[in-house]
Image (tube, rainbow, N blue to C red):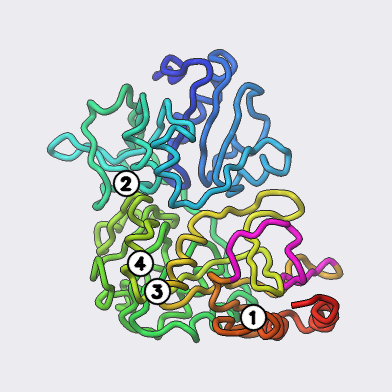
Amino acid sequence: MLDVGAFLHPGDGVWWGQGSAEPEQLVNQVLDAVDEVGPIRAFSGLTWNARLSGDLPELLTVISYGGLGQLRRLSRNGLLDVVPCHYSALPRMFAKGQLPCDVGLMQVSPPDSDGLVTLGIGVEYVADAIPHTRTLIAEINQQMPATVGGPKLPLSAFAAIIETDRPLVESPKREPDEVELGIAKNVASIIDDGDTIQIGVGSLPEAVLDALAGHADLGFHSGMTADGVFTLVEKGVITGARKEIDAGLVITGAAFGTRDYYDRLHEFPVEFRPASYTHAPGVLSQLRSLVSINSAIEVDLLGQVGAELARGVHIGAVGGQVDFSRAAALTGSRSIIALRSTNGSGEQRQSTIVPSLHGGVVTTSRVDVDAVVTEHGVAMLTGCTVAERALRLIEVAAPEHREELERALADQEY
């Protein structure tokens, strides 16, 4: 059995792939080795690995670009160090050594006839970190699909490998509720045929994708993709025929979905590209049809978006939201923020349209948001004065909170 600890030195920085592409067995070996090796700094993206939810070695420092998946529990317990950054900045930060990059752990596809492996469904920041990493260690998983668009690596690139044959971890799934279906319907109403969509993953994004089933010739360019995208490809809705670049292709950095679609990726016109491509301003500025659809925790009456903190806990991230929102608002078609009008339940329900951001952190600037969408409607903000924006936002707030928001508006000078 491989001893990952043998490749680690005290003070090293380790990174690994995220989501379904996380090489869990290698990651867990690092966790087991920390106490023996010495202090280790580790960079993790979204993880579903229960080992990373708490009870970590004292000598391990976990760093991430946000509190995603199990990392939310670490943040809640004060055990997560967040580096606030745009997703597009990750390649440069790895290149400058500002993120841990002594040892890189990745899950790859089996070698092809030329002895080359691909990064499978997790190209994204992994591809950009590889050239700046001292030691690479790979899990070659027989069930990781070979994908197109990212780098191909010879086995000689790795200091060590392990071989597995395990199903890829599936993205946790929850069916959209009535509120999310209402939001999705409103979002779909302001998307035109031929638009190029950027969207995240989760129950609300899946509901939005379902609501787009009646559209035509949509394109797709995003940092991540899920089952709903490929369902629309199968239905002939996403064709990419009108995309200004990468016509006919679904462009993404990572897949977060089910085993069925992982197994069938070879059937779709999809290319997995590094973050240095998917999120690059120079690339996104060429997509004049770009519509960004992002979620939020809260939006204030100025139109500023908070998507990172709730009650002092990191439950989100800057991620690619600003990269895509700014591109869509400036050189694309439209930037959309979609969220429920309330969070919590019963007497604890609170408005997500607020006088000022409770989290205290602005993720996306008001000038990069064209529309805010809730289940109560669409607030089109572009071209509106500050006061007009506030009034439109109140109109899409939960009815029981509108009077309170109106009073707050009257008390503030806009």
Mark-to-mark CA distance, 2 and 1: 37 Å
Residue denoted by label 4: 285
Q: In this view, does 104 lie above or below 324?
A: above
Q: Give the x, y percent position of residue 16.
A: 45, 36
84 relative to 347 in the view: left or right: left
Residue denoted by label 1: 375
Q: Which residue is drawn at 55% across and 28% down?
A: 41
Q: In this view, does 244 lie above or below 55?
A: below
- Which residue type carries mark 4? Ser
402 part of magenta stretch? no
Residue denoted by label 2: 120
Residue denoted by label 3: 332
Q: Give the x, y percent position of residue 218.
A: 34, 77
Q: What stretch is highlighted in magenta?
A: 348-366
Residue 216 in which image quadrant: bottom left
The N terminus lies in which quarter of the figure?
A: top left
Q: In this view, does 207 lie above or below 126?
A: below
- Which residue type carries mark 1? Glu
In the image, which is nearer the foreground, mark 2 or mark 1?
1
Mark-to-mark CA distance, 4 and 2: 27 Å
Disc on the earlier residue, 2 or 1: 2
Principal SS element in the magenta part? Answer: loop
Question: Are there few (<14), some (14-19), or many (20+) residues within 10 Å of tag 3?
Answer: many
The C terminus lies in which quarter of the figure?
A: bottom right
Disc on the earlier residue, 1 or 3: 3
